[in-house]
Image (cartoon, rainbow, N blue to C red):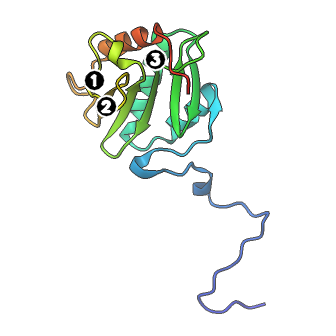
């Protein structure tokens, strides 16, 4: 049967969609929409879907966190990766993509010494914003970040 000019062809249910459909949807700010799940797999799927320079930030954050806290627990909740200390039921850190930066949330950050630089409406939470120039001198202090991660993992985590 011939189609009208300009009419769209209907796809058979068994046909594969283009490869782009297999990629996670990017929400506002370029944050990947990843199904929630426990373990390293969902976190790695989130990091793989982070767009552009944010992908490298996510890989580095994950590597530093895993190096600073052996056996760290991982999960994706609310389209963000979460990290928890082994044996603790709570979470100490998460991150999320925005247009101009990756927001790292230390859920118990007010108790860290020194506290991360950006305040929050929640009195216990502090943030670190990692911008596109993160690799330039002083833009991302990896030693300070690892110290915050170790301190945060040593405190009771937030139960969400």
Q: Which residue is mark 3?
A: 65
* Marked residue nearer the N-terminal end (1 or 2): 2
Q: Which residue sits at x=43%, y=31%?
A: 95
Residue 130 tag number = 2
Residue 97 tag number = none
* Marks 1 and 2 close (CB-CB < 8 Å): yes
Q: Which residue sits at x=49%, y=50%?
A: 26
* Marked residue nearer the N-terminal end (1 or 3): 3
Percent x, y of residue 81: 52, 31
Left or right of 55, for residue 143: left
Q: Secondary structure at mark 2?
A: strand
Percent x, y of residue 117: 25, 24
Left or right of 102, for residue 12: right
* Marks 3 and 2 close (CB-CB < 8 Å): no
Q: Which residue is mark 1?
A: 140
Depth check: 16 or 132 in front?
Answer: 132
Depth check: 104 or 21 in front?
Answer: 104
* Marked residue nearer the N-terminal end (3 or 2): 3
- Separation of residues labelled 1 and 2 (CA atoms): 7 Å
């Amino acid at each position: 049967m011939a189609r009208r000019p300009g009419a769209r062809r209907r796809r058979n249910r068994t046909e594969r969609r283009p490869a782009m459909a297999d990629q996670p949807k990017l929400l506002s700010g370029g944050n990947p929409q990843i199904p929630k799940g426990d373990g390293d797999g969902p976190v790695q799927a989130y990091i793989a879907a982070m767009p552009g320079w944010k992908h490298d930030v996510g890989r580095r954050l994950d590597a530093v966190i895993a190096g600073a806290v052996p056996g760290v627990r991982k999960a994706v909740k609310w389209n963000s990766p979460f990290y928890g200390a082994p044996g603790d039921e709570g979470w100490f850190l998460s991150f999320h993509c925005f247009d101009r930066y990756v927001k790292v949330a230390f859920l118990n950050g007010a108790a860290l010494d020194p506290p991360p630089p950006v305040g929050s409406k929640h009195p216990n939470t502090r943030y670190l914003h990692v911008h596109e120039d993160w690799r330039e001198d002083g833009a991302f202090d990896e030693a300070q970040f690892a110290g915050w991660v170790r301190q945060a993992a040593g405190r009771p985590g937030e139960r969400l």
